Each structure stands twice: as structure tokens, then as C-alpha cells.
């Protein structure tokens, strides 16, 4: 879904925002807020007492530009940027196939 007139200033391709820092891949689990998605991924955590791993999850809110248009269930790549709001420090760069 390519939007020709993307005027989002927080868009990494068409806007003024710079990308730096960490990069993650995860699944979109929520897209309720305006231009915001919640991305989640599972990570293993080692417990030395039992010498086993447990599953832990990480959830991050990311800016979802109109030209990217990620929906619930999509696998996306997010990259770190400067703070966009109180809880958003990441932006969705593309949708993974």
C-alpha cells in the first residue's frame, strides 16, 4: 500500500525524522491508537537455578505511518528514533513477508 502524498513528518521515508539505534522484528498485536501499533516478540530468558529457559515477551509502541499501514498480525521491522511521544521511541520501517 504505497501512498503518493505521505505528509507524515514522522515517516522515515518521506518525513524529517532520523533513524538511529536499535532494530527489532516482531508481530503487531494492537493497532487501536491513532498512527500507533504495539509490536511484540518472544525472547528466551535463562533461569540458572533450573538450568532452563523460559519465554518472556517484549512489547513496544511504534509509530505507524500511513504509507506503511501495518495491521494486526503483520510481521514488521521497527527502528529506534528520537521520542515521538511519551511512550513512542520507535517507528515501523517496513512489513516483513
Image (spheres, rainbow, N blue to C red):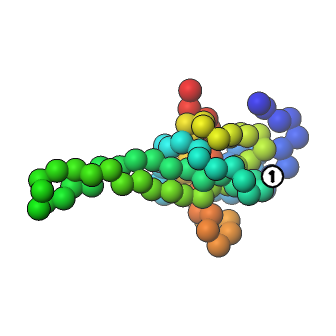
Q: Position of residue 79 (x, y in %)?
A: 55, 51
Report the residue at 54% width, 42% height from top: 27
Question: Which residue is identified by label 1?
Answer: 8
Placement of the C terminus among the 4 image quadrants:
top right
Position of 73 with respect to 6 (left or right) is left
Placement of the N terminus among the 4 image quadrants:
top right
Report the residue at 64% width, 50% height from top: 30
Task: Note whether 78 is above or below 73 in the view shown.
Answer: below
Helix, strand or loop under label 1: loop
**Residue nearest the observer in this picture, 19 or 73:** 73
Task: Note whether 44 is above or below 71 in the view shown.
Answer: below
Q: Position of residue 60 (x, y in %)?
A: 54, 58
Q: Position of residue 63 (x, y in %)?
A: 67, 54
Q: Position of residue 52 (x, y in %)?
A: 16, 50
**Residue nearest the observer in this picture, 26 or 80:** 26
User: Is any atom of residue 16 visible in this view?
Assistant: no
Amino acid at each position: 500500500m504505497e501512498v503518493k502524498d505521505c505528509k507524515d513528518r514522522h515517516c522515515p521515508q518521506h518525513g524529517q525524522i532520523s533513524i538511529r539505534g536499535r532494530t527489532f522484528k516482531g508481530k503487531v498485536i494492537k493497532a487501536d491508537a491513532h498512527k500507533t501499533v504495539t509490536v511484540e516478540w518472544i525472547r528466551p530468558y535463562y533461569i540458572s537455578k533450573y538450568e532452563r529457559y523460559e519465554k518472556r515477551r517484549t512489547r513496544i509502541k511504534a509509530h505507524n505511518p500511513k504509507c506503511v499501514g501495518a495491521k494486526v498480525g503483520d510481521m514488521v521491522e521497527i527502528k529506534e528514533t528520537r521520542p515521538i511521544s511519551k511512550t513512542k521511541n520507535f517507528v515501523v520501517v517496513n512489513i516483513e513477508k
